[in-house]
Image (tube, rainbow, N blue to C red):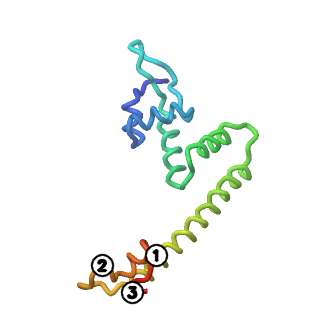
C-alpha cells in the first residue's frame, strides 16, 4: 500500500527530500501513487530501495552504475555472476584509486620532509618551488 509522502520516505531512508526527487528524476525510484492533493506517495519497499542506492553509492558506484545494479536486481534472468562482474569492475577502479592516492601521499610526504619549516622565507620553500617552479635561475 502506498502511503509515505516524500518527506517521510526521505526521513526513514536517511536522505534529504531533494535526494529522493533527484533519484526519481534519474528513474531510480518511482512513487506508487499520488494523494488527492497531488502528493507523491511511496510504499515501504521504497525505503529499502533508497537504502540500496545509498549503500551502493557508499561502495563507490556512480548513480548510472546503481541503475544497472537495480536493473539486474529486477531481472528474472540475471545471475550472481552478473552482479559479481559489476562488483569486480568497481573493485578494480577502487584499486586504481588507491594506487593514485598512494602516489599523492608519497609525493606530499617527500615535500613535507624537504621543507625546513620555521621562519625561513616562503621564497625558499621547496613545497612552493614544486607547486610553482622557478623558470629562470636568479643571477644567471
The vertical placement of 46 against 109, above or below, is above
Mark 3 or 2, closer to the camera: 3
The residue at which mark 1 appears reads as 135
Mark 3 or 1, closer to the camera: 3
The residue at which mark 3 appears reads as 139
Residue that extends furthest to the right in the rendered view of this protein: 77
- Would you say 124 lies left or right of 78 here? left
Judge by depth and name the residue closer to the eye, 71 or 65: 65
Say if mark 3 contacts mark 1, CB within 8 Å.
Answer: no
The vertical placement of 92 against 60, above or below, is below
Count of numbered marks: 3
Residue at 47% x, 32% y is: 44
Sort mark 3 into few (<14), some (14-19) or many (20+) by Cα contacts within 10 Å. Answer: few
The vertical placement of 34 against 139, above or below, is above
- Would you say 45 lies left or right of 128 here? right
Residue 100: % across, % down:
55, 69
Say if mark 2 contacts mark 1, CB within 8 Å.
Answer: no
Mark earlier in primary sequence (3, 2): 2
What is the distance, in whole Å, between disc 3 and disc 2 at their CAs? 19 Å
What is the distance, in whole Å, between disc 2 and disc 1 at their CAs? 17 Å
Residue at 74% x, 52% y is: 81
- Would you say 81 lies left or right of 59 here? right
Residue at 39% x, 83% y is: 138
The residue at which mark 2 appears reads as 122
Residue 93: % across, % down:
62, 61
Residue 39, by quadrant, is: top left
Q: Secondary structure at mark 1?
A: loop
Judge by depth and name the residue closer to the eye, 3 or 59: 59
Residue that extends furthest to the left in the rendered view of this protein: 119
- Would you say 67 lies left or right of 126 here? right
Say if mark 3 contacts mark 2, CB within 8 Å.
Answer: no
Amino acid at each position: 500500500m502506498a502511503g509515505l509522502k516524500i518527506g517521510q520516505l526521505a526521513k526513514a531512508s536517511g536522505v534529504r527530500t531533494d535526494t529522493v526527487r533527484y533519484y526519481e528524476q534519474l528513474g531510480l525510484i518511482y512513487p506508487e501513487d499520488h494523494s488527492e492533493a497531488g502528493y507523491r506517495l511511496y510504499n515501504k519497499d521504497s525505503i529499502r530501495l533508497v537504502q540500496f542506492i545509498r549503500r551502493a553509492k557508499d561502495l563507490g558506484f556512480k548513480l548510472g552504475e546503481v541503475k544497472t545494479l537495480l536493473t539486474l536486481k529486477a531481472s528474472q534472468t540475471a545471475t550472481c555472476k552478473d552482479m559479481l562482474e559489476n562488483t569486480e569492475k568497481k573493485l578494480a577502479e577502487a584499486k586504481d584509486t588507491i594506487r593514485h592516492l598512494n602516489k599523492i601521499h608519497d609525493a606530499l610526504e617527500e615535500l613535507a620532509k624537504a621543507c625546513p619549516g620555521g621562519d625561513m622565507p616562503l621564497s625558499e620553500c621547496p613545497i612552493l618551488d614544486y607547486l610553482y617552479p622557478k623558470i629562470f635561475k636568479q643571477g644567471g
